[in-house]
Image (tube, grey):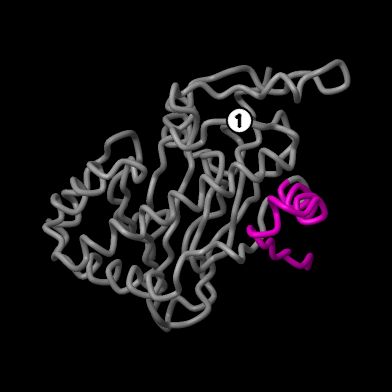
Amino acid sequence: MVGIPAIDLRLAGERPEESARLQDACERLGCFRVSGHGVPAALQAEMKAAVRALFDLPDEAKRRNADIIAGSGYVAPSPANPLYEAFGLLDAAAPADVDAFCARLDAPPRVRETVKSYAEAMHELIVDVAGKVAASLGLEGHPFQDWPCQFRMNRYNYTQDTVGSSGVQIHTDSGFLTVLQEDDCVGGLEAWSNGRLHTVKHRVQCVAAVPRISIAMFLLAPKDDRVCAPEAFVDEQHPRRFKPFNYDDYRKLRLSTGERAGEALARMAA
């Protein structure tokens, strides 16, 4: 097994060797652990407690977390992923959307404040990580601050009978970048980089008979919805591998075909 590197964000923007380690992790593995991120441990713990409280809501309340774009709302257990359920919030970078998410669920005041504080902290973090990834590749000035973010809160309903089974099927994430609390997995959308970044396949395995909570922030795509590799990544030696496409069309394709482990992206080949 290849060891997953730990990247100190405080150093990635200051020391060339740390920036080079970040670039290598993105290109070779597609994931790395983050330290020096500035999100307080107390806030992380409070958010886990808030998520557990939301999952304790009645099914009727959970289903009020409706889709804003395809697949962005509540996900109930299904034949493909019978142990998995999740809430979704789009756009977590917009305070009004965070308020609307909490209001639809009638979340208690303490839960609302925790979700708002955590969403703000995680948005700052994912923008910081994205900027440092771009800088490690020689790209500057990309407005990640304006990109929409999806917030997903996951619960895996494990029991003794399910130990050893898969909590969620093998997949890649559909957005450019994911910051995940608990699973420590960060993946990138390959089309954005013309093949420079590795989009890692991953799944969740049941290893203990206890419910498992994870919390993910996804930096999705440019604000105008248009995904296209930067010209700096395209030349005679590196021809364009993917035709420009609309992110929402790609997301709908993944959902309609069930191709979530890189197959749908292959359809976008130039």
| Residue at position x 46%, y 50% in the image | 124
95 and 265: which is toward the camera? 95
Residue 15 falls inside the magenta stretch: yes
Q: Which segment is the magenta one? A: 1-26
| Residue at position x 60%, y 38% in the image | 189
Residue 51 sits in quarter: bottom left
56 and 21: which is toward the camera? 21
219 and 210: which is toward the camera? 219
Q: Quadrant of the N terminus?
A: bottom right
**Identity of the amino acid at label 1?**
Gly
Residue 161 sits in quarter: bottom left
Question: In this image, 97 relative to 43: left or right?
Answer: left
Q: Quadrant of the C terminus?
A: top right
197 and 172: which is toward the camera? 197
Q: Residue furthest right?
A: 237
Residue 194 falls inside the magenta stretch: no
Vertical placement of residue 203 versus 245, above or below? below
Q: How many marks?
A: 1
Residue 100 sits in quarter: top left
Residue 195 screen position, x and y as percent: 73, 33
Question: In this image, 32 relative to 18: left or right?
Answer: left
| Residue at position x 66%, y 32% in the image | 140
Vertical placement of residue 151 versus 174, above or below? below
Vertical placement of residue 59 versus 247, above or below? below
User: Where is mark 1, residue-wise?
Assistant: 141
| Residue at position x 69%, y 32% in the image | 139
Residue 136 screen position, x and y as percent: 73, 42
* Label 1 Cα neighbours within 10 Å, binned few <14 / some 14-19 / many ≥20: few
Secondary structure under tag 1 reads loop
Residue 92 screen position, x and y as percent: 34, 46
